[in-house]
Amino acid sequence: MTAPTTEGDRMPPVGPVTVAASSLLRWGAGADDFSEIHHDDAAARARGLEGAVVHGPLQVAVLVEQLRRWLGRPARITDVEATYLAPAPVGEPLVFDGEVVEVVPGEAGDEVLGCELRSRRPDGRTTVRVLARARTGPAGPGSALPVEQLRRALRLGEVAGTFRYQVQENDLEHFARAHEREPDPSGRVPATYFGALDPVERRDLHLDGFLLELPFPRTGGGNAFNEVEYVRPLQVGDEITVTTRYTEVYEKQGSSGTLLFRVRENEMTDASGAVVATSRCGHVLGFAVPASGTSEVAGR
Amino acid sequence: MSWARLDEHGGVRTGELSRPRRVRATARQAELLHAAVELVLGPGGDGATARAITLQDVCPDPLVHALRAGLPRPAALDRQIDGGSSWSQLLELEEGEELVSVSSVASIEERRTSRGARLVRTIFLTELVRPGTGERVGWCTGTSLDLEVAR
């Protein structure tokens, strides 16, 4: 098969093919969907259908796998949006086809393909329509991870943002439950809650989203460390202003690939302007970077 | 015809949230799903591609996933049908990796069909994160339609 490169390129159709009972059975077991409408005509009719129907998500999975095979490696299908338009009766053959409807440059120097895929009945009626977005592979040889670009994006050493949070009782309840504990009935705020007053973890500060677009497989990631020094404990009702600065960005080689570290400091002050605490958080992302990989992201 | 937002339908409220669930990208589940697909398409030429675990393997039917998480499906009208699904994957998954999923009723909307029947669309959103780091792996949606049969 020839990989698609331009709008209008058509995915080689598959079918007409009848989805076998053994396929429905495996799908039902894998998807934990044992609804009778997929194998019992009478039950399906009682639900207003003409008879048993093929699972919609199974048709989607067929189309997505067909697209994956057509695109080949290293393309990655990142987004799939399916609409179930009509029932696909069990025993009736289906045709699976589609085409590229859009090709746009990706932020990581690769290309993003928009594809429209369909599953159709013999009468031409579309049962499932899928809009899929796929990213093509690495852009080509060059430098390693975009450390300098990341430093600029994070405004290293400067104030990256200032945020105000109120310590509320229901936030503490959520925090306790997220840690699978019951809230402290005395209303005492645990010291670990300082970690929750982090604009990055709260998704209020997001300066490095382009890292998710780098054309390298991710090998891992997470918090490398969290430290906090506090002057006094937090109290319910405290209004805390958090000023965030990124202080370090560096790269290291690890057993799981190339590791990219970002370190930030949060200075927390109360309504009177007094410093309550300072936290320091390190976050790491691991990438499998080929020896000649490149990743400078255009336009940032 | 445009959709109008509803706060509630059939006792189900917008914003309703499930308890967090721990889910795992198991090879066994992926094998079953891939086998179902291969029975339609035939075996793939690239075995590695065929075996890669994706969000669709962890959450193959987002509507079923949200209902299994304990959220109620609105059924106030005559027929309930599945309207669609979507998946957005941000990070690659490792085989056997454990994730935390939380489902919610993201929206309830209604409109009239061209035949004048009432149609209510409920979208269930499931977000999946890595426990410990809280990294967002991706999300998926499942759509349930509650339909009045035109008489």
Image (tube, grey):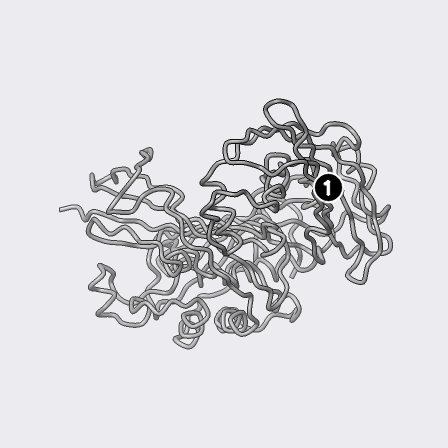
Look at 53% across and 74% down and name the residue there: B28
Q: Position of residue A239 (x, y in %)?
A: 55, 29
Q: Nearer the viewer, residue A192 or A67?
A: A192
Q: Position of residue A44 (x, y in %)?
A: 25, 65
**Which residue is labeled 1 in the image?**
A280
- Give the quadrant of residue B68: bottom left
Look at 61% across and 55% down and name the residue there: B132
Task: Determine whether A7 is above or below A121 in the image.
Answer: above
Look at 20% across and 39% down and name the residue there: B116
Q: Give the quadrant of the C terminus of chain A.
A: top right
Residue found farthest to the bottom: A22
Task: Determine whether B98 is above or below A23 in the image.
Answer: above
Q: Is residue B130 left or right of residue A117?
A: right
Task: Determine whether A4 is above or below A146 in the image.
Answer: below
- Give the quadrant of residue A233: top right
Q: Is residue A250 left or right of residue A90?
A: right
Residue found farthest to the left: B151
SS label for mark 1: strand
Q: Nearer the viewer, residue B54 or A178?
A: A178
Q: Give the quadrant of the N terminus of chain A.
A: bottom right
The disc labelled 1 sits on which kind of residue?
Arg
Look at 54% across and 65% down and name the residue there: B24
Task: Determine whether A286 is above or below A238 in the image.
Answer: below
- Give the quadrant of residue B1: top left
Can see residue A240? yes
Give me the chain letter of mark 1.
A
**Number of numbered labels in the structure image:** 1
Q: Position of residue B150 (x, y in %)?
A: 17, 46
Label 1 Cα crowd, 10 Å radius (few <14 / some 14-19 / many 20+):
many
Q: Is residue B121 left or right of residue A9?
A: left
Q: Position of residue B48 (x, y in %)?
A: 66, 69
Q: Nearer the viewer, residue A11 or B105?
A: B105
